[in-house]
Image: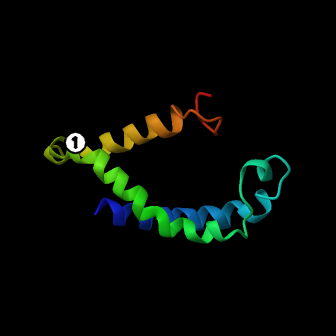
Amino acid sequence: MVMVLHTITYFIAGSISSYQNDYESLFKMPIVRDFMISFDSKWIMIGPLLQPIRGFIYAIVLWPFRPFILSINIGWLYIWSLYIGFTIIGSTSASPFSME
């Protein structure tokens, strides 16, 4: 279930973000093109197909916490706050909204 939800969410959010933020022209900008692959690369199209692997990794990581997450009504909120804390705010890259 985690794999399926992750893949669907990744595809929908990525498609909306790509259209809304005009990734094609953004990826051609001088600094961005140095660390991002070209928008017309085959890997851009293959990316969503690889997301079940990432979803599987998430499922394995979350499995030990399953009893706790399912025992309370707001278990999803704990997962979401962990995700925001570790991947966005505490990211080790110089990404927007991170502490770096």
33 relative to 44, above or below:
above
Task: Out of 77 and 50, give the one closest to the viewer.
Answer: 50
Secondary structure of the residue carrying tag 1 is helix
x%, y% of residue 71? 13, 44
Q: Residue at x 19, y 47 (%)?
A: 66
Quadrant including the N terminus: bottom left
x%, y% of residue 8? 43, 68
Q: Residue at x 66, y 67 (%)?
A: 19
Amino acid tagged 1? Phe
99 relative to 55, above or below:
above
Is 66 on the left or on the right of 31, as rendered? left
Q: Residue at x 63, y 66 (%)?
A: 44
Residue 74 occupies which quadrant of the picture? top left
Task: Out of 72 and 38, give the one closest to the viewer.
Answer: 38
- Can I make out residue 57 in this image? yes
Residue 53 occupies which quadrant of the picture? bottom left
According to the picture, the residue beneath numbered tag 1 turns out to be 65
Is 95 on the left or on the right of 22, as rendered? left
Q: Residue furthest right?
A: 30
